[in-house]
Image: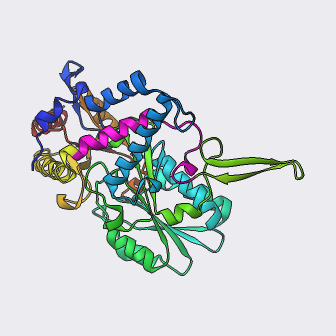
Amino acid sequence: MMLDPYKIREDFPILKRKVNNHPLIYFDNGATTQKPKQVLEAIKNFYGKYNANVHRAVHTLSQEASELYENAHEKVADFINAGGMEEVIFVRGTTEAINLVAYSWGLHNLGEEDEVIISLMEHHSNIVPWENLSRMNGFRIKYAGVNEDGTLDYESFENLFSSRTRLVCISHVSNVTGVINEMKRIAKIAHDNDALLLVDGAQSVPHMPVDVKALDVDFLAFSGHKLLGPTGIGCLYGKQEILEEMEPFHGGGEMIREVSYNPATGRCSISWNDLPWKFEAGTPNVCGGVGLMEAVKYLEGVGMESVKEHEVRLTEYAMERLRECKKVKVYGPRDVSSKCGIIPFNVDGLSSHDVALFLDSYGIMIRSGFHCAQPLHQRFELKSTARVSFYIYNTREEIDKFIEVLKELERF
């Protein structure tokens, strides 16, 4: 069923405000999404009724908070079709999830003889941890190329594999161009070469159905704030058998089963807690988990197929209208079916920041700069790009206003 963005907009209080005396048009959803009143109410309700630390006490509030927090893990597991909450680790976001894999798996499994494959379209959060770790452990990083239309060069990608390849790190969807990578194909290539696959799902999980079993990924990282949830909460999915073998990322409370001091040795022996708590040291972001659970419920109510179809329709319409602008250059593939609702562009003679500021004066929020993906911009010799990114509450009328302002900018 087609979703109704006008009905959905009623659930988002922020969309009623004005910016610079103009109705707010929010086209920066690739960076973060707005929050429906259901999520805002769930956060308020938790702190007003259930606030307590989890897994720490037998009193009523702690038991209720613990149940909510565990239910949140189960809900997210169902959302991505994981095997259970044992495979769902709550983290601060995509960046921490990738760092967790780097330092809990990579630090102990990658050495001087090993290789890791990354693509040039990656967000910095899927580049920097591996570059840092390679300086420590000495493994080699190979970068897969990108075609002229922004799609992955699969021939280049396949040619990078060798008997030393241990891990592939790649985004499901580019946060610059919106390109959707063929994850089943990539997973098969990786596994045929005895390599694990880590997927950055920050731009895919909020925008399309994602089934970790069907895709056969080993790790999937994504952020709650990009799918209607609060900031400071995200998820690392990992296959249980791999997570069982990994070392913890952080040490402290919650992630241990037992700490026992031995007077004879003067040391403590430590055993780890069960999954997923083994990787969730300290007091967790319980309220964030509750907010994320409510966001997932909201998206399930809308339907992820409907979310994707709505974005495709908006992107097709926006691409068609942008052809009317004589000084605007759009980057990435023209085939909208192979991408999410992200459009990077520039206006001749202006920096992306100039464009963003002009649009802001009309209440239109877009992103400008490198979008934390500088190597991809270098690939196309671009100093920066402006970027619009759509979501479930955006409308054709908002795109019409956006085009009207762009034409005004061209005249200016």
The answer to which quarter of the image holds residue 299 is: top left
Write down the region rendered in magenta: 274-300
In percent of width and height, residue 34 lies at 29, 33
In front of the other: 301 or 209? 301
In front of the other: 412 or 137? 137
The answer to which quarter of the image holds residue 229 is: top left
Q: Is residue 289 left or right of residue 346?
A: right
- Residue 147 in view (yes/no): no
**Relative to 310, does residue 395 appear above or below in the rendering?**
above
In front of the other: 200 or 146? 200
**What is the basis of the colouring in this image?**
rainbow
In percent of width and height, residue 186 lies at 37, 71
In percent of width and height, residue 29 lies at 29, 40
Q: Residue furthest right?
A: 264
**Relative to 395, does residue 118 appear above or below in the rendering?**
below
- Residue 219 in view (yes/no): yes
Query: Residue drawn at (32%, 28%), measured in percent from left and top?
Result: 40
Query: Residue drawn at (44%, 76%), measured in percent from left and top?
Result: 191
Q: Is residue 280 left or right of residue 88?
A: right
The answer to which quarter of the image holds residue 183 is: bottom left
Query: Residue drawn at (51%, 66%), measured in percent from left and top?
Result: 241
Residue 366 is inside the magenta segment:
no
Q: How many marks?
A: 0
Looking at the rendered image, the quarter that the C terminus falls into is top left
Query: Residue drawn at (40%, 21%), measured in percent from left and top?
Result: 48
Q: Is residue 50 left or right of residue 152?
A: right
Q: Main secondary structure of the magenta part?
A: helix
**Relative to 223, does residue 375 appear above or below in the rendering?**
below
In percent of width and height, residue 185 lies at 33, 73
Residue 299 is inside the magenta segment:
yes
